[in-house]
Amino acid sequence: MRGRAELAGPETIGLKALAFLAAAAEDLQRFMAISGADVASLRGRAAEPAFLAAILDYLLANEALLVDFCKAESLEPRDVHLAAAKLGG
């Protein structure tokens, strides 16, 4: 039986995580400060697996954000871990 992360696809989970962060201005600003990204690079790098992995790693490092994201997307934290690993995180 395949897990939800495989069904949704790691790229999809990463893009959903980016959209989730984009909806939370303070969390997005914190991610950009830590990663060195700006708004233009968010758009330009959204298709890069390593960048999506960095977004997922950011969520994984913040339990409250991870829980909120998982609730919003009906995922388990394990799904996020698996997606990050498959994207190169």
Image (cartoon, rainbow, N blue to C red):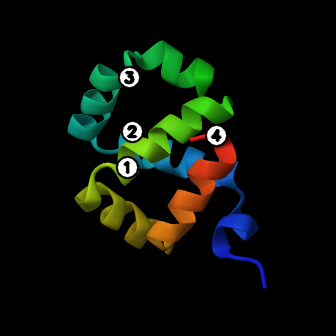
* SS under mark 4: loop
Residue depth check, mark 4 versus mark 3: number of the one nearer the observer:
4
Check the image and report above or below for 10 versus 50. below
The quadrant where residue 24 appears: top left
**Residue at horizontal 27 percent and vertical 59 percent from the top:** 63
Q: Which mark's residue is nearer the viewer, 1 or 2?
A: 1
Nearest to viewer (mark 1 / mark 4): 4
Dot 1: what SS? helix
Q: Which badge, 4 or 3, is on the more N-terminal residue?
A: 3
Q: Give the mark nearest the N terminus, 3 or 2.
A: 2
Q: CA distance from mark 3 to mark 2?
A: 14 Å
User: Quick one: label 3, few (<14), some, or many (20+) residues within 10 Å?
Assistant: few
Of the image marks 1 and 2, the number of the one nearer the N terminus = 2
Residue 3 spot, x, y in % from top left: 69, 76
Q: CA distance from mark 1 to mark 3?
A: 13 Å
Question: In what element is the residue under mark 3?
Answer: helix
Q: Residues within 10 Å of mark 4 (few under 14, many from 20)?
A: few
Quarter placement of the C terminus:
top right
Q: Position of residue 23 (x, y in %)?
A: 35, 44
Badge nearest the viewer, 4 or 2: 4
Quick check: marks 1 and 3 in contact, CB under 8 Å?
A: no
Q: Name the residue carrying label 3.
A: 35
Look at mark 4 in the image and give the residue it sits on: 88
Q: Is residue 64 left or right of residue 67?
A: left
Where does the image place residue 10, in percent across and percent down from the top left?
67, 53
Q: Earlier in the sequence, mark 1 or mark 4?
A: 1
Query: What residue sits right under mark 2 in the picture?
Result: 22
Tag 2 or tag 4, which sits nearer the N-term? 2
Given contact means CB atoms under 8 Å apart, are the residues at marks 4 and 2 in contact?
A: no
The label shown at residue 59 is 1
Rendered image: mark on residue 67? none
In the image: residue 49, left or right of residue 68: right
